[in-house]
Amino acid sequence: MIPLLFTILAQNFEQRGFIDNSTTFYPQTALNDPAQIVNETLFRWEVSYKVTPWLKLSGAVDATTDTHQQVERALRLDFDDRSIQRPAFSLRRYSATLHKGKFTAELGRQFIRWGKADILNPTDRFAPKDYLSNVVDADFLGVIAARVTIESGNNTYDLVWQPWFTPSRTPLLDQRWTVVPAQAQGVTLDDLGARYPGGSQYGARWNHVGSGYEYSFCFFDGFNNLPLFSTTFDAVTNTAGLQRYYPELRLYGADAAVPLRWFTVKGEAAYFSSTTPDTDQYALYVIQLERQVKEWSFVGGYAGEILTRAGNPLEFAPDRGFARSFVGRAGWTIDANRSLAISAAVRAAGSFTRFEYSQTYGQHWRATAALAWIRGDMTDFIGEYRRNSYASLGIRYSF
Amino acid sequence: MNRLTLLMLAISASAFAQDPRQIIEEVQKRTRSNSQRYAGTLEVMGGESRIAIKKWVFERLGSFGQSKAVLRFTAPAEVKGVALLIVNHPDRASDQWMWRPNIGRDQRIALQDRSTRFFGTDFSFEDLEERDVDQFDFKLLGDEGGAWKIESRPRKSSQYTHSIMWVKKDNYTITKVEAYNKNGLARVIDYRDFEQVKGIWTARTTEVFDVGRKSHTILKFDKLEYDLPLKDDEFTVQALRRES
């Protein structure tokens, strides 16, 4: 009887996960960070259980540590990712999904991704990231929200309410992915944490799939998950205090995908306005082409920005930092186990190029070697990281 | 049954047998089902050694040109949860979306080049497409070992210039396909381990040999079911996200 019960329960239970160890080698020291080798280990376990045909519970937990103090050493279980350092143990996801006919609702901590482009997603506003280890290839963070999706024919309506703000996690001030300007050398930087906004955020998206094309329009009203910084300066101790704050943000966006005979064209654009004083107002847009030729895939395009009002220059905004660039990616599937990828963001004042080779061993193991080359001027968002070119080696066991 | 009836039946069967298009139509008719589900196992072999194994669950609703299908990978562990939604159209290329759990987003995929290998195996995406009789011209080349040998030439663009297929006379099953491109023989696909499931003769094992790469891939069907009650709302982009 008990084995039968377990068998029935197991049919509705799914799980997957991995343990990943990666080492990054930086040939150059940074002015605020002498470390040249960083090792990180991450264990991730994702589970889901279908209680009934209309109710599914999902959860995910992360356990992580590193050699560079990006991860907290405190033994606590985090559930909202608001800490400046990455928590050692966190509930990455906990949500319930209800589904009936054309109606789907997901409640709890979840991942919400909007947009159709692959090189930059200006409309992806419910998707904060963890930029602690790397501003280029950052992992997404979940948000605590209620999401309702209604499907009607070729149309999908998506309504999101996020009552609890989740910020993107920015690089630590005393580490290499925070670039200290030359004129601030000798000044002690004091991290004063963050002021999180109260109030909720909401958004709506309408997606239409037509005959050979697809488009959507979206609206978001809430806060930017990327911070501005307010500063204080103590001349006696020669210390600058920096505190993160998150401006109000309203977004009007659209995206489209049109598969053509030779290329698939994808575009995405959003206009951002804010009532918070001293904030920028701007538009971000992406136009990209993609094509597959046998075992090669190519994605290339241009990410642009139009600034309509200039505000606070002290901000951390990788989404805007990679705009005004030609961005591309080429991937080659060598065989069922091996792949090679080259990605690049290039403009006059800065460039980022990354080569990655990946190979699986058996059913569970994958090794990945990467080489990133960053060049440019200190005045450029990409170029300012020119001392952060790196080589990395990762090994992952998936289960 | 009188002699005249027998004679008429023999004449009509003979005439029927000489029309390759009608033979293929009969193949389609006998394999038609409203829905299908199977658990697939793919073994990719380089030379004599196995270099990769992939598993998935496949579900299809509708048939021949107007179907929808979802393919969900279950192994290896790192691709568990990756899913592909294919919406076929009778008059144009299929719409496809892929769901990758690690990025939490669906991505529209357009296969301008259907000769792309299917997830690094020896099957191309085109090899796994449904073949509608109206998309080909057929020519009967003769008989061979109790099977009709039929040449098919695609009417629309294809990586192949033509294919030769063998159709068994006793049960109208396709047992082998040789696919040629402009350089000659490109792929050989063998169908074997036939079994009747809900009255449909189905090959439990399909093996493709890539002549150029000298590698082969074996696809095995397990837990095969036809005409099961699948719902339309299980074949949407939202369903990819919901079931990930």
Image (spheres, grey):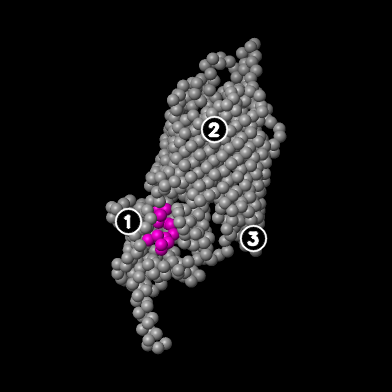
Q: Is residue B18 above or below residue B154?
A: below
Q: Which residue bears the numbered disc 1?
A: B161
Q: Residue furthest right?
A: A199
Identify the residue shown where x is 42% and y is 47%.
Answer: A261
Residue A289 sits above or below residue B239 on the image: above
Q: Which residue is mark 3?
A: A5
Q: Position of residue A348 (x, y in %)?
A: 44, 25
Q: Which residue reaches farthest top?
A: A236
Chain of the residue where label 1 is placed in the rendered structure: B
Q: Nearer the viewer, mark 3 or mark 1?
A: 1
Side of B80 relative to A77 (left or right): left
Q: Is residue B218 visible?
A: yes
Mark 3 Cα shell of 10 Å, populated few (<14), some (14-19), many (≥20): few
**What residue appears at the point 37 percent right and 82 percent down from the top-left corner?**
B8
- Give the residue number, with chain letter if any, for mark 2: A284
- SS for tag 1? loop
Q: Position of residue A108 (x, y in %)?
A: 67, 44
Please state which of the two labelled residues, at mark 3 or mark 2, is closer to the viewer. 2
In this image, A48 relative to A182: left or right? right
* Residue at x 44%, y 64% (from the top left corner): B204
Is B122 drawn above or below residue B21 in the view shown?
above
- Find numbered disc 2 in the image and state the secondary structure of the residue it sits on: strand
Q: Which residues are magenta?
A: B123-136
Q: Position of residue A281 (x, y in %)?
A: 60, 28
Query: Which of the pair A126/A102 is nearer the observer?
Result: A102
Query: Which kind of residue does numbered mark 2 sit on?
Result: Leu
**Residue A161 within the magenta-colored segment of the rendering:** no
Q: Nearer the viewer, residue A77 or A256?
A: A256
Give the spatial CA distance, label 3 vs label 2. Answer: 54 Å
